[in-house]
């Protein structure tokens, strides 16, 4: 299995920190955010990693190199202007191959996430070994978390491992998901496109599965959250 790390965002809410440092390279507890993910992926023997970048992307390449110092093999998908999540995947499809892949937002902090579990997330067969019809099998598998203070209404409902657009309770999408490449067929390489509408469309068909991740997780979206993770005082 391959992995993709989303690292192309500008990080507007993190300014002025991100004026000179790309958000995924901001340090949490002595280690850049993106490196936490790389090490956890390698621990699960997921070593082929694609990283897209735009804002200050050269600094990401300089910091991570080809990934060998982490035991990984890193490829880069450079975007002149950030193409959003689905657009970033579409541009990088030639690097991702045809098999399901895991994608992770590089600006979240979840130091104990076990990526072994993602390898079995999308199955082509049911528990009896019978193949799923193409129009019935899950197209994506999402990891959800309890709603943080900044997203109290959540994103998706979860009914027996099936993601739904409506229902209660709702949970927040963690930024970690497993996807089949064909769900991005409608996005042309170089076209900006968001992931959420694609997920909601497949969820409406009953083709998105998921589960709740209950480990440590933080969306490092503001300087205040970054400071709190690092044990610093905020004003």
Image (tube, grey):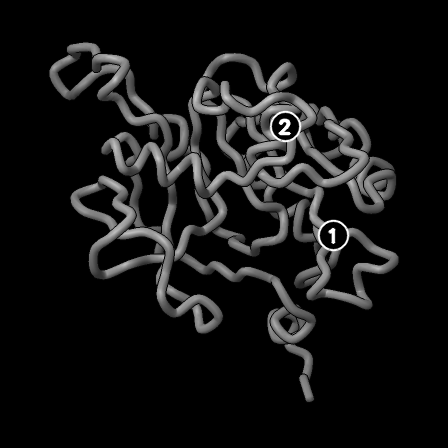
Find the residue positioned furthest to the bottom.
Answer: 235
Residue 49: image tag: 2
Image quadrant of residue 133?
A: top left
- Mark 1 nearby-residue class (10 Å; few <14, some 14–19, many ≥20): some
Find numbered disc 1 in the image and state the secondary structure of the residue it sits on.
Answer: loop
Which residue is pictured at 66% across the width and 24% down the height? Answer: 91
Which of 26/40 is in front? 26
Which of 17/213 is in front? 17
Which residue is pictured at 81% across the width and 35% down the height? Answer: 80
Which residue is pictured at 62% across the width and 52% down the height? Answer: 107
User: Could you tell me residue 97's position as x and y percent?
Assistant: 56, 14
Q: From what the image shows, is residue 117 above or below residue 216?
A: above
Image quadrant of residue 134?
A: top left
Find numbered disc 2 in the image and state the secondary structure of the residue it sits on.
Answer: strand
User: Could you tell me residue 74's position as x and y percent?
Assistant: 71, 27
User: Could you tell me residue 124's position as x and y percent?
Assistant: 28, 16
Is 187 on the left or on the right of 56, as rendered? left
Find the residue positioned furthest to the left.
Answer: 128
Q: From what the image shows, is residue 45 above or below residue 143?
A: above
Which of 74/235 is in front? 235
Say whether disc 2 or disc 1 marks the residue closer to the N-terminus: 1
Q: Is disc 2 in contact with disc 1, using a CB cutoff of under 8 Å? A: no
Is 65 on the left or on the right of 24, as rendered? right
For the C terminus, the image quarter is bottom right
Q: Nearer the viewer, mark 2 or mark 1?
A: 1
Q: From what the image shows, is residue 224 above or below residue 32?
A: below
Name the residue beneath numbered marker 1: 10
């Amino acid at each position: 299995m391959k992995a993709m790390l989303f690292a192309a965002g500008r990080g507007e809410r993190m300014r002025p920190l991100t004026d000179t440092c790309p958000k995924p390279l901001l340090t949490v507890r002595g280690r850049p955010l993106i490196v936490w993910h790389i090490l956890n992926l390698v621990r699960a023997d997921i070593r082929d990693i694609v990283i897209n970048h735009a804002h200050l992307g050269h600094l990401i390449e300089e910091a991570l190199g080809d990934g060998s110092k982490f035991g990984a093999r890193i490829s880069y998908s450079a975007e002149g202007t950030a193409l959003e999540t689905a657009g970033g995947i579409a541009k990088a499809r030639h690097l991702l191959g045809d098999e399901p892949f895991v994608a992770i937002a590089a600006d979240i902090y979840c130091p104990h996430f076990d990526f072994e579990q993602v390898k079995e997330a999308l199955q082509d067969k049911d528990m009896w070994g019978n193949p799923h019809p193409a129009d019935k099998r899950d197209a994506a598998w999402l990891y959800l978390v309890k709603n943080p203070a900044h997203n109290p209404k959540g994103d998706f409902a979860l009914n027996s491992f099936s993601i739904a657009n409506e229902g209660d309770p709702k949970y927040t999408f963690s930024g970690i998901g497993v996807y089949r490449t064909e769900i991005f067929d409608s996005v042309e390489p170089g076209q900006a496109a968001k992931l959420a509408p694609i997920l909601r469309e497949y969820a409406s068909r009953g083709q998105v599965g998921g589960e709740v991740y209950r480990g440590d997780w933080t969306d490092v979206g503001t300087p205040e959250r970054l400071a709190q993770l690092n044990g610093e005082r905020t004003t």
